[in-house]
Structures are given as C-alpha cells and as structure tokens.
Image (tube, grey):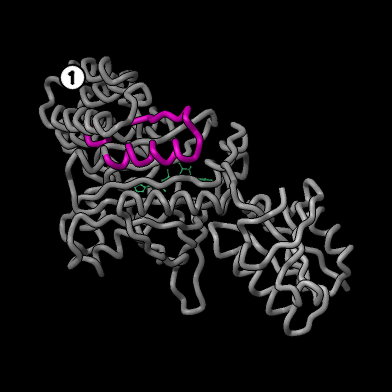
Amino acid sequence: MTMRFRPVRGMRDLLPDEARGLIRLFDLSRRLASLYGYEEVILPTIESYELFAAKSGGEIKERMYTFTDLGGRKVVLRPEATASVARIVASKMLGYPKPLRLFYIVNLFRYDEPQKGRYREFWQAGYELIGSGRALADAELIEMLSRFMEMAGLRDHRFKVGHVGVHRALMGIFKVPEHEQDDVLGFIDRDQWDEAMKILSSYPAELRDVLTGLASVKGGMDKVFEEAWEQLSRYEPALRELERLREILRYAVMLGVPRERLFIDMGFARGLAYYTGVIFECYSHLRVALAGGGRYDKLISLFGGPDMPATGFAIGLDRVHLAQVEAGVSYEDRTFKALVVLAGEDERVVRLAGEALRALRGKMGARAVLDVSARSIKRAFSYASAQGYDYVVVVGRREAEKGVVSVKNMKTGVQVEVPVEELPERLPD
Ligand code: HAM
C-alpha cells in the first residue's frame, strides 16, 4: 500500500527556487548584523509555556502550538524570540559588558489563519539592543531597519511609529494596574476600542476621553507633536514620554532616516504585551507589516534579571521576500554556475576535476557542481542546459594529459580549452 503526504495546513515546503530568495535574506540580515556590531545567538525552538504566558499578549498566546512533552512539561513551539533573548540575558549574560547587541535568525510558529504573507511557520531576523535606555538606542534600530529595507531593494518603505509609554503613563496616573494596561493595549492593537473602554469603565471618564482623543492624532512629525502636546498638557508623566518619542525620531532623522518615511500614530499599539515605550512597524506596498519592534524595559527583570532597559525589532523575512518578488526587485547576481563533468574516472582525471572545482569555488562565489552521475557527456550537457548552468567543464583523459579542461559557455556555445590554473579568469564569452 502506498501512502501520499502533503504538508500539514499552514506549513510549506520551500523548493530551491523558493528557498533561494529567503536564504539571500538570511545572508543580508547577517551582513546587517555584522555592519552594526550585533552578535548572533542560536535559540531553542521549544520553550516553556510560561515564558510566553505572561507577556506575549492575548492574540499570540491563544495561537501558540502548545503541547505536553514526554516528560510531562507544558511547552510551546516558539511564537517569537524576544522572550528567549530576555531569558538568556537574565540568566546567563549579566556579566557581559553592556550594551549588548544580539542578533538571531529563527523560524517561528503561530496558528494564524493561512493567507498571503501569513503562515503558521515563518522566518524572522531579529536584533536586540540590551542595556541602554537612551533614545539614541531606539533611533539606531529604526535607522538600521531602514537600511535593511534599502539593501533589500524596498525603497518605498515607511514606518508607522507610536509610543505605548504615553498610554501606560496616562493609565498609571489613574492607577490602572499593569495587567489591565496590557489588556487595554491588546484590544487597541486589534482595533477593538469598545472592549478596551469596557476594561476602563470603572475609572474616571476623563481617562477614556483622553485615550480616545489621542487616537485621532496621527501624521508627520511636526504636526503630530504639537497636537499631542495640547491634548496631554495636563498629564506631566505622559508628556515626558511624548518628549521621549520626539527625541527618538529626531535622532533617527539625524542618523539618516528620511523624515517623510516616519508616520506617527498616537493610537497605535502592538500585539505583544511587553512593550513599555516606542513601538514601530515597517511597511511597503504590501498591506501587512514587514517588520515590527519596540522598547521593552521590564521583560528582563520579569525573568529574574535586574532592571535592564532593552529595545529591538524583528523582520518578517517571508514577507520581505514576497514584497521583493511583487516589486520585481532582483539582486545583481554576478556569480556563475558551472557543472564539472568527468569523462572517465581514473586518478588523473578525478584529481584534475578536483583542481578545477577548487579553482572555480575559490574565487568569490562561483558555484561549481561535480556531476556525480554516470551519464554520458551528451546527457550531462542537456542536464546542464535544463538546469540553467552557465558553463560546463569537461575533464577527461585527453585533457588530463595536457593539464587543461574544456569549458563550454552554455549561452553562446563557445568552447575552449583552458589550463586549470587559469580558472576561473579565462572563461569563454
Ligand atoms: P511581531 O510584530 O509579532 O514582533 O513580528 C515581526 C514580524 O514578523 C512582522 O512584522 C511580520 O513581518 C512577521 N510575521 C509575524 N507573523 C507572521 C506570520 N504568521 N507569517 C509571516 N510573517 C509573520 C515580534 O515578533 C517581536 N519579537 C519583535 C521584537 C523584537 N520586538 C522587540 N524585539
């Protein structure tokens, strides 16, 4: 009996053509990390349920892949990675000099409804800056994300920026406990204002009025701050947070983010409950966010560490790839691909093929593949042509005697003999 399988709903097989785009983004995000001095960490896929239960926010918590392992522990497939980083910092990295700059590439799992740009397993590159509470740290991250989008060829990107510190300060004035603040922000994130206001119904109406009034304040930097200032003038702690937001954005512009890319929305909240200050998302022509992040100053102490300010963001790499495909962004690919085919397999031939492969691979990025199948040269050529190889390199006994290889340019059909030490400089046009 045969059995046929396909991926479980929401899971994807990525064949070479689909995987390639994503892998290039892994490379790009690593390059960004090294340009800005972020060090890579490798994080576990499975974490304890409690790590996310407290501060992930209702929406993400309800959609976690949760199960009991064979040892009876309640565990989850990670729905995000900031909590893991905070756990590691709180438990293992307290002695490291601060600020710490950490970077990761992770696959994540959320039981979201599958649709365009929304998968149940997806990939993020994340950057966390830990141990600095300064506005400059948040500004660095916004500029870095902008740089990533530029490098990825998405020049039309823009930021949506908010600051939950303002909302928390307002609720703090009216003595709303932190868990209720989290719930209110969670509902605002889902645009369920009625639910959010229901939680606040036992507090003075003034709080609900100022929060709803604030939500209509949105736009460019100059206009928004003036309007928000007016609305918050009587609430000193909230004003201080607003001033902080202005400082962050001014620094971001000084570091090189064009100010017209920054769109401020004072009614903006994000699904994760650990945010305490600035929050942001990045968009291009796709309707879904390409990346998101913000400041989370209390997560490390929640996990048993000292009070330690932190800020960060994560890029949804699948979505960036989708945006690139739709926008027709193509990376310039200067590398070529060569198939090295053996005619005969005696020692001299195999050695020469080895030399040719090393010479081709030795230089920047040339992809050289050894044909390990025992097919005829003719079949090897048709295979190479179907697979889009740029060159076929034939190594046989005749070539081995002369110390040369025969190289054919598959596009032009030109074939020449090249001394192996002149590879890859001398390739036929
Ligand atoms: P997040 O906004 O939940 O933040 O996710 C960041 C990005 O991951 C989103 O903007 C989106 O591009 C991508 N993403 C989320 N869900 C899906 C999905 N179902 N399918 C495809 N892509 C998706 C975080 O995860 C925070 N840990 C970011 C952070 C780091 N905050 C501070 N540091």
Residue sitting at 79 percent across and 46 percent down?
412
Instruction: Residue 392: tell me if it is visible.
Output: no
| Front-most of residues 216 and 145 | 145
Q: Is residue 174 left or right of residue 256?
A: left
Magenta stretch: includes residue 259: no
Q: Is residue 348 above or below residue 18?
A: below
Residue 313 x, y percent position in the rendering: 36, 45
Rendered residue at 75%/78% (across/down) = 349
The x, y position of residue 248, in whole percent, is: 23, 33
Q: Residue at x 60, y 69 (%)?
A: 358
- Chain part drawn in magenta: 140-166
Near mark 1 (Cα within 10 A), the count class, few <14, some 14-19 or many ≥20, is some
- Residue 131 in the image, given as x and y percentages of width and height: 19, 53
Residue 164 visible, this angle: yes
The amino acid type found where label 1 is placed reads Trp
Look at mark 1 in the image and give the residue it sits on.
229
The x, y position of residue 101, in whole percent, is: 28, 55
Q: Is residue 374 above or below residue 233?
A: below
Quick check: 335 left or right of 33?
right
SS at badge 1: helix
Position of residue 65 in the picture relative to residue 116 (left or right): left
Asked if 264 appears above or below 109 in the picture, the reply is above
